[in-house]
Amino acid sequence: MPELITISPIDGSEVARRAYADEHHIVATLRRAKIAQRDWRQVSLVERMAVLSRAVDAFSANKEAIAGAITRQIGRPVRYSPNEVAGFDTRARHMMAIAPEALADIRPAPIDGFNRFIRREALGVVLVVAPWNYPLLTAVNAIIPALMAGNTVILKHSAQTPLCAEQIHAAFVAAGLPAGVFQYLHTDHASTQKLIQAKEIKHVCFTGSVAGGIAVEQAAAGRFIGVGLELGGNDAALVRSDADLAHAVDTLVDGAFFNSGQSCCGTQRIYVHQSVYQEFVDRALALTEQYVLGNPLDAATTLGPVVRVAAANAVRAVEADALAKGASQIVDTRRFALDDGKGAYLAPRIFTGVNHQMHLMADECFGPVVGIMPVKNDEEAIRLMNDSPYGLTSAVFSSDENAALSLGDQLECGTFFMNRCDYLDPALPWTGIKQTGRGATLSVLGYDYLTRPKSFHLKQM
């Protein structure tokens, strides 16, 4: 039977080898989840919170080992990986804290002689399909609220990050979560599609590519279940003439290159008012050339490899397209010795002279690349920023909040930022429009997608 084999982008070594779940294993997992949900939904919210809090405690206590595993699996510098464990903790605790409010009965205006309210009921078994690029943060967004709402969860993690699923599960077991309430499966694409089609699955939370989202929708077609999709991005930022330029450069360079640019909400397109364009470019170049491309297990490294050689080659193809269409790549890549033009290590790349006929400015590119383009005014910036098949986040850097709010109302995105980018606030819903997907995670609204409304209409005699 085919095996799941995880290869580290650091040096090509094998990180993990697992047998894919066979049909018997999948059927048994689904059955356990369905049976466990009957009891779990009856557990009080206070008790659910207590056991999940213990699980988060157990998970966070293992921070260094978990962070090290993330680095080996995806190549993120070890100086940053512990932050994802901390983010898992923060988001989990926030979603637990707001559960009483989010799951409370909704009561319309009273009418004499009647007791009327809307109760949020658990859906049943929720399938969470998580990606490798932020393997903990993308998973926790759905896992904790799904469990808090009384659902049971099956996690299918990326083949690049199987250890993350196992480590989350181990923490839940250590906390005493009842058997079957949270499980994981290692499955290939064909088995994942069959899993989505299983009658036990009542909702799917998917984070990944547009192509993956289409496959999920097709697998769920005709089942009348909810499908939450957080897909691609080609996120844009505007630097106005009144921006704090030093802050804009620091923030946007980090937004473009953190995690080697492998972020759905990473900044890939920057539009700068023409009056400050050249200064912005000069400062961004100077900062970018301070990055240290190296072995991510070295504490001095600030930029690791992309996830695999094929991903690096896809970035190189985007670069070739941009150069062929007239762009200039202004970073001296010779300063980054590990970028040999063949492997998974990529120097950061800044492109000028860009236009929207280039894949760089039109499509998602999962790598350390960014295009910078001058604009004459806000109107031109809005037109260009909205000229995208995606709509995850948009950012404006300005000292004028009223102007920024006006721009935010006109930008087609799920999250609008002023003077920051590439960030999730668990108190706000994470959502997108167009090919970025549908649905929402996080915030009180995230619970709406993990429950169904049930109306109670009682006539008093």
Image (cartoon, rainbow, N blue to C red):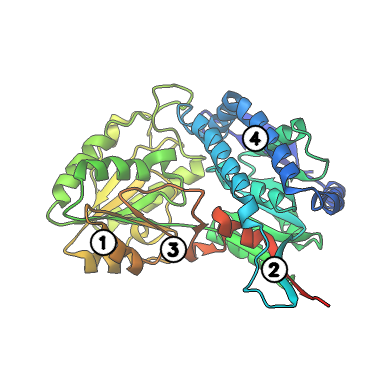
Give me the C-alpha separation between circle 2 and circle 3: 35 Å
Tell me: residue 90, above or below residue 277: above
Q: How many labels does the image show?
A: 4
Q: Residue 215 carries which label?
A: none
Task: Report x, y in % for residue 66.
Answer: 60, 29
Give me the C-alpha separation between circle 3 and circle 4: 33 Å
Q: What element carries label 3?
A: strand
Tell me: residue 59, above or below residue 382: above
Q: How crowded is mark 3: few (under 14 residues within 10 Å), some or many (20 or more)?
A: many
Q: Is mark 4 on a helix, strand or loop?
A: helix
In terms of sequence position, does the residue under pointer 4 or pointer 2 come before the other?
Answer: 4
Q: Say whether residue 193 is left or right of residue 238.
A: right
Outermost residue, left side: 275
Question: Which residue position is annotated with label 4?
Answer: 56
Question: Which residue position is annotated with label 3?
Answer: 390
Question: Between 263 and 188, which is closer to the camera in this rendering?
Answer: 263
Q: In which quarter of the image is the C terminus?
A: bottom right
The disc labelled 3 sits on which kind of residue? Tyr
Question: Between 81 and 366, which is closer to the camera in this rendering?
Answer: 81
Locate residue 363: give its quadrant.
Answer: bottom left
Q: In which quarter of the image is the N terminus?
A: top right
The disc labelled 1 sits on which kind of residue? Asn
In terms of sequence position, does the residue under pointer 3 or pointer 4 come before the other?
Answer: 4
